[in-house]
Amino acid sequence: MNELGTSNRKGLTARGLRLWGFLFLLAGMVGKGILLHAVPQMDNPTGQELVELWRSHGQGLLKLSLVLQALESCAAPIFAFLLVEGFRYTSNPGRYILRMFGVALVSEIPYNLCISGTVWANGSRNPMFAMAICLVLLYFYKMQEDQGLGGAMIQVMLSVMAALSVMSLGVPDGLPLVALVLILWVLRWKEKRIPVSAAVSLFCATLNPLYIAAPLGFLFLHFYNEEEDCGSRWGKYLTYPILLLAVWLLSLIVF
């Protein structure tokens, strides 16, 4: 297997998908954690505010930051897909959920340092919390399968609760992530799940214009060869907070 996660079988392995996902996340971290800080009066603006700034300012750093943040959205479908696949094949969903919440807690301080330069940020949590909430949602979704109309109604209520949870936590782009996970789960046995999910991710651009590049992430899913990841379990989980800390340290050197 080479560095980009390909193997003797054609296509990308789960490790390859994860690697590309982290590269896209790294692009967004650099855009938000370094370049955006170099632009005056930038205090965690929303995606819509950034687009307006693009139109009204000609600053090169701002535009490069926006491009990198748009590339970051390509990671959403990749990690949503890996989350669904991981849940499908895990032997212990409870431990899987607890691990994800553990990583979310561990990532919180590195995330705040990278994005805002502070240890604690009010009203905003890192995206790993949305991933953990999605796992809880899938757990109860699975419990309600084959329960008829009553089960379907409960699933709808659970979906609304998950959406409200990520909103109340202030997880950036939490709603698009919940939507992608749900679509990928519901269509997990159908051949058209990737194009349908790509269309959903494009619709998510109405929530955040920077999500316009998210459908590109599904190109990588198209080449997934269903080969399992044999890497270290904790290596997969701890890569995210380590990248956040690295970008934060780099921002200290730059500024």
Image (cartoon, helix red, strand yellow):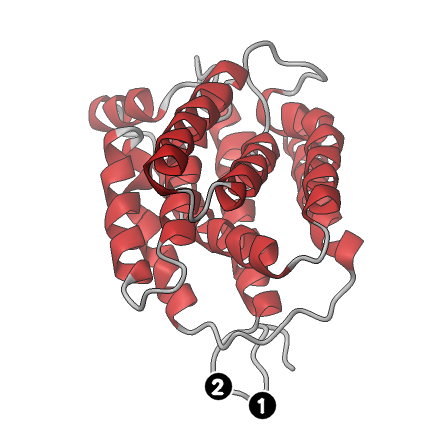
Q: Residue 4 placed where, x, y %? A: 57, 72
Q: CA distance from mark 1 to mark 2?
A: 6 Å
Q: Residue 30 placed where, x, y %? A: 54, 40
Q: In which quadrant is the N terminus drawn?
A: bottom right
60 lies left or right of 224 = left
Q: Residue 33 placed where, x, y %? A: 56, 31
Q: Are marks 1 and 2 in contact (CB under 8 Å)?
A: no
Report which quarter residue 173 is drawn in.
top left
Q: Residues within 10 Å of mark 2 (few under 14, many from 20)?
A: few
144 lies left or right of 15 = left
Report which residue position mark 2 lands on.
Answer: 10
- In the image, residue 215 sits, relative to residue 8, either above or below, namely above
Let me know if residue 65 appears in the view.
no
Assign a secondary structure to mark 1.
loop
Residue type at mark 2: give it: Lys
Residue type at mark 1: give it: Asn
Q: In which quadrant is the C terminus drawn?
A: top right
> Which numbered circle lies on residue 8?
1
Q: Residues within 10 Å of mark 1 (few under 14, many from 20)?
A: few
**Front position in the image: 123 or 159:** 159
- In the image, residue 27 sits, relative to residue 23, either above or below, namely above
Residue in the picture at 34% in, 36% down = 63
- In the image, residue 164 sits, relative to residue 192, either above or below, namely above
Report which quarter residue 231 is drawn in.
bottom right
Assign a secondary structure to mark 2.
loop
49 lies left or right of 122 = left
Let me know if residue 155 appears in the view.
yes
243 lies left or right of 219 = right
Q: Residue furthest top?
A: 122
